[in-house]
Every structure is written in structure tokens, then in C-alpha cells.
Amino acid sequence: MYGPLAQLVARLDGIEEVAGSIPARSTTWRVGELYVVHHPMNIPHYGDYQKASRKTRQLVNMDHPIVYPAMGLSNEVGEFLGKLKKIFRDQKGKFTERDKESLRDELGDVLWYFTQVCTELGLTLEEVGKSNLDKLFSRLERDKINGSGDKR
Ligand SMILES: [Mg+2]
């Protein structure tokens, strides 16, 4: 049994802790005839997980011009969010002019990669924007602006 699964089993009803209770040490749980040992500092079953996960992998050919800008788009969104996170973590959400300039620059990077992705798909920025507003106003008119699901 793998580490995360062992932890899940340990949360199920009808279990009995049979050894150990100090969080930093291993704990053995009995579930019927099954014994589950969990050690927070030693995760030996991740090796099993790694081996088993390889059976589900696929080699995917990603030789397409959209790949690089799509990765860049995700990366730049991450850079933007990283800076935003630090403003909240370190400055209690107070934005300086320098922060705004820095975030503006990251949004510019996002825009650049976003534009390249659109171009690779043969889409103009205008049609992407119009399609998005059409969708949102339709939801607004039908009182479906909240909730989830792409096709609501
Ligand atoms: Mg950047």
C-alpha cells in the first residue's frame, strides 16, 4: 500500500491504532486483517508509486509551434501570481507603485504569450474577446453568471 493511501485508510472508520502515537514516529494501524504502517519521515512506498505510475505514462509528441508559447503563458501567469503572493504575504496586500509596474510587466509577458497562442490557433484577439463577452453577457441575461461548468 502506498503512503498517501495508507494515510487515507488510517482515517476510515473501524480502525484501531495498535502501536505508536507520537506524530514524529511510525504508527501502525490495523484495519481488519490489514496492518498499515505510516512513518511521516520515511516514505518507502513512494518508490512503489513511482514504479507503478510508469505503467500509465504515454510518450506524447508535442512538436508543434503552440507548445512553446503555451508553456510561456503558464510560466508568466506563475510569475505574476508569485509576485502577487509576496505582496500579500510580505506587505499585507499594500501595493506600491513599483509593485504595480512589476505586475504590469508580468501581465505584458502574459499578453505576449497569450497572443502567440491565439495566433498559432488562427484566432484573432478580437474574436477571442468578443466570444468571451458574448458568453458572459448570455450568462448574465440568464442569471447564470455564478456557478460552474463551461456550458451553462
Ligand atoms: Mg515575466
Image (cartoon, rainbow, N blue to C red):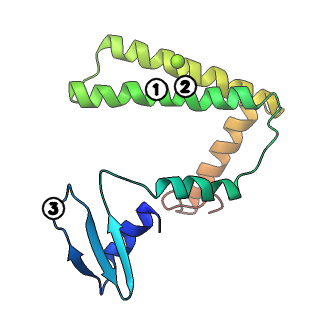
Q: Nearer the viewer, residue 11 or 143?
A: 11
Q: Which residue sits at x=74%, y=31%?
A: 67
Secondary element at image label 1: helix
Residue 57, position in %: x, y?
Answer: 70, 52
Q: Is residue 66 visible?
A: yes
Q: Which residue sits at x=78%, y=45%?
A: 59
Q: Quadrant of residue 19?
A: bottom left
Which residue matches tag 2?
76
Judge whether 19 appears above or below 133 on screen: below
Q: Is mark 1 within 8 Å of ligand 1?
A: yes
Q: Is residue 140 visible?
A: no
Question: Can you tell which of label 3 and label 2 is closer to the viewer?
Answer: 3
Judge the density around disc 2: few (<14), some (14-19), many (≥20) Cα neighbours within 10 Å.
many
Q: CA distance from mark 3 to mark 2?
A: 43 Å
Which residue matches tag 3?
22
Secondary element at image label 2: helix
Residue type, label 1: Phe
Judge whether 141 appears above or below 33 on screen: above
Q: CA distance from mark 1 to mark 3?
A: 41 Å
Residue 11, position in %: x, y?
Answer: 31, 74
User: On the rendered structure, is 134 left or right of 101?
Assistant: right
Judge the density around disc 3: few (<14), some (14-19), many (≥20) Cα neighbours within 10 Å.
few
Judge whether 123 appears above or below 106 on screen: below
Which residue matches tag 1?
80
Q: Quadrant of residue 49?
A: bottom right
